[in-house]
Each structure stands twice: as structure tokens, then as C-alpha cells.
Image: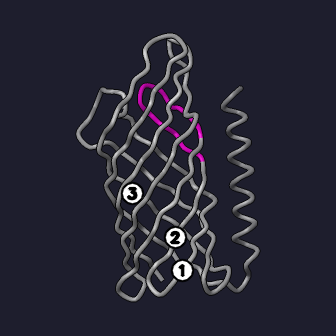
Amino acid sequence: MKNRGMLNKTRFIFLLCLMCIISVVRAETFYEASVGVSRMALDITQKRGPAFEDNSNAINIAIGAYRQSNEKSAWGGVVEYIGPIGRDDLPGSGRLIGFRPLNYLRNMGRNISYELYAGAAQYDWRKAANGYYGGFNLRYEIFDNRLGLAVDVKYFQDLAFDSPQGDDIVDGFNTGIKLIYRFK
């Protein structure tokens, strides 16, 4: 029943984002691909049983589509994958798949911009754990705004799944740096 509520929230966020993107009729559309490295700091809490804290290095891959809303800002959606590097069985060795239908990208100056975002996430370690996350990044763009570097911070909340000890709840931060390429 809990997953059904999460699915309805995800559909609502997706439709809201879709309406925002479609509402801009004459806007320029652009696409981005990024790859980066990050550090995950996860807290895995069990109702009955020990809590785990786990830090791991991860690789991040993302693809996004954006539409300009004016000269300095854009709205978009992003799908991303975060996978641990060289880990198989420990807490924190699960992969994260995120869908961010709410992305606001704002250009602050010639080469500097920031992005705020929110979306749904799935943490897959023993079982799939569904929840949500949000974050921001600060970007420095080079080479005619096609290539950029970003510092990214995310927080995952209430990624929950059932276990023999009761519900496991995964929360935590992901901080990293990524290289972004913009297709125009």
C-alpha cells in the first residue's frame, strides 16, 4: 500500500513537470549528459535490529532534457544512475536510480549557473526501496556553454523496504563532482 502512494506522488510530480515543460511553446530545448564521481554517506535504520552507517565511493551517470523558460532559466527532467565502485555485499553497495521531474536551472552570470531539483528514487540493495530526494549543484560552464563542471549535493529520504527485522529506512547524502556535456 505504501508503494501505491509513492507511485501516485511520482505520477503527480511527473505530470506537473510535464505541464511546466509543455507550457513554454516557443522555447529552446536542449539535452545534457553527465558523468561524475561522488561519495555516498548512508544511514540504514531498522525498526528491530542494528542501524548501519556506510560510506562509499560511487559513479554517477545522468541524462536530462530542458526547455528554456526565459533567457536565464530553464525547467527540465533528469534520469540518473548512481552505482558504488567495487562493492558487492555491504550496506551502501546498492545502486540508486533517480527520476527528477522537477529541475530548475538558473544562469547567474556568463559562465556560472545553479540547478535545484527534486524527484523520486529507488535504492536497490537487498530489495528495492522507494523514496524521494532533492539537491542542488553549482556549475561552471566552458567551451561555448557546451561543457561544464559541477559540484553536486543530494539528500535521499525515506527509501524504505521490508526486511525480516521490520522496515529498513535508508537516508543519506551524496556529494560529488561531475562533467556535463550539453547537446544543442
Q: Contact, CB < 8 Å: mark 2 with mark 1?
A: yes
Judged from the image, the secondary structure of the residue bearing numbered disc 2 is strand
Is 38 placed above or below 22 here?
A: above
Please provide percent x and percent y for residue 162. Answer: 55, 20
Residue at image x 23%, y 39%?
A: 86
Q: Residue 72 is drawn in which quadrant?
A: bottom right
Crowd around label 2: few <14 · some 14–19 · many ≥20 (10 Å): some
Q: What's the magenta region?
A: 120-131
- SS category of the residue bearing label 3: strand
Mark 2: amino acid:
Tyr
Which disc, if any, is residue 61? 3
Residue 117 to residue 95: above or below: below
The nearer-to-camera label among 3 and 2 is: 2
Q: Residue at x 56, y 38 (%)?
A: 157
Amino acid marked by disc 1: Met
Image-based side of 159 in relation to 179, left or right: right
**Residue at 53% over, 54% down:** 135
- Name the N-terminal-most of marks 2 and 1: 1
- Answer with the quarter of the image where residue 181 lies: bottom left
Camera-nearest residue between 8 and 141: 141
Q: Nearer the viewer, residue 145 or 22?
A: 145
Task: Give me the residue at 68% from left, 38% from top.
Answer: 6
